[in-house]
Amino acid sequence: MVAQADRLVTDEPVAAPAQTEAAGDNPLLEMDIEQLMHMELIQTTVPGAHWHWEDDWMVGYQFMRVQNEGYNVGTNSVSDQQVLRGGNYNNIHTSMTMDMHMLMAMYGPSDDVTLMVMVPYMDMTMNHLTRTGSSFQVKSQGFGDIRISPIVSIFDEYPHRVQFEAGLSLPTGSVNKKDLTPTGYNQLEYKMQTGSGTVDLQPALTYLGQNEDLNWGAQARGTVRLGTNSAGYRQGNMIELTAWISPKISDNFSPSLRIDALRWGNLVGRDSRLNPRANPESDPNLQGGEQINLLFGLNFAAGLDDEGRGHRFSVEGGLPIYQNLNGPQIREAWRLGGAWNWTF
Ligand SMILES: [Cu+2]
């Protein structure tokens, strides 16, 4: 820590005026550390949107529920009956609930490198309506794809920092989830699988900014799927752009507003166990789309020390303000989640 503080002071000889409430014996040193430590509330719901100093550890848990209801063809919503009758499907989905529980661990081997591991557990439910008017429900649970990410600082001059993340997603989830349906114990739809089945590259570029009154930032992340999974397909590649602004109300509380834009492709290949005429979610060509979500969050900190160790937690929820789906495809209604991080 002494070496770190020395470096911070020498790197920042003309830092902004102090607004430190907890100045100790050395106000200048305290101020520099606080500014560069990103002490304020961070965007805990965006993985990779912070870092850790050398020898600091973090463990965390994140939860997210995504509720899907109704269908879109492009940007237009269409009724369940239009899809069922018009598309001549055996059944359609009246709703889908996806819960993701994610365990995270982070460690800083140096001030410029942070390592991150994320282990998701998925719990999904789909409600079906058949042509004969009956309904049934299927469920799938299990671990998803584990992501390992080294995060490297490529620019760091208060109040700006830019990080590159070399994310790698491993196929630890399943592409063979089955459940009981009216016709037997069957392979579940693509969206009900807990993993992609392929090794996926997930590079990200993150920009973080802060001053005494505000946190802001943006992240661009790509997902590039390599090869073909054991079920005979490759999920579509994805690009995600997100940006947020978070005014600091106090040292322990900041609301946030975030915009999240996603674009993802159809499947390449298909799972021969799924009949694409059964329902839209079994059709490999009705999987892609683009979406923009608007999210509102509340971010809290508790027991933070001068070096940024302590607890941070957030709740965040939002709605899509734009959805353009290769459809008919079930569309998102809302999402709600939260995260807790403990740095020590
Ligand atoms: Cu962390």
Image (cartoon, rainbow, N blue to C red):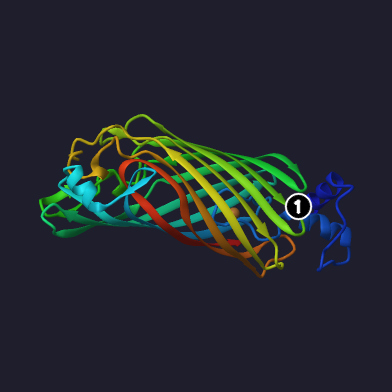
Q: Quadrant of residue 314?
A: bottom right
Label 1: few (<14), some (14–19) or many (≥20) C-alpha neighbours in 10 Å:
many
Q: Is residue 309 visible?
A: yes
Q: Quadrant of residue 139?
A: bottom left
Three-letter code for the amino acid on which mark 1 is drawn = Leu
Whole-percent x and y of residue 226? 40, 31
Q: Is residue 64 visible?
A: no
Write down which quadrant ligand 1 falls in: bottom right
Q: Quadrant of the N terminus?
A: bottom right
Q: Secondary structure at mark 1?
A: helix
Q: Is residue 156 left or right of residue 186?
A: right
Q: Is residue 334 left or right of residue 251?
A: left
Q: Is residue 226 above or below residue 41?
A: above
As drawn, the residue found furthest toward the bottom would be 303
Q: Is residue 174 left or right of residue 58?
A: left
Q: Quadrant of the C terminus?
A: bottom right
Which is more toward the observer, 77 or 295?
A: 77
Per the image, the residue denoted by label 1 is 36
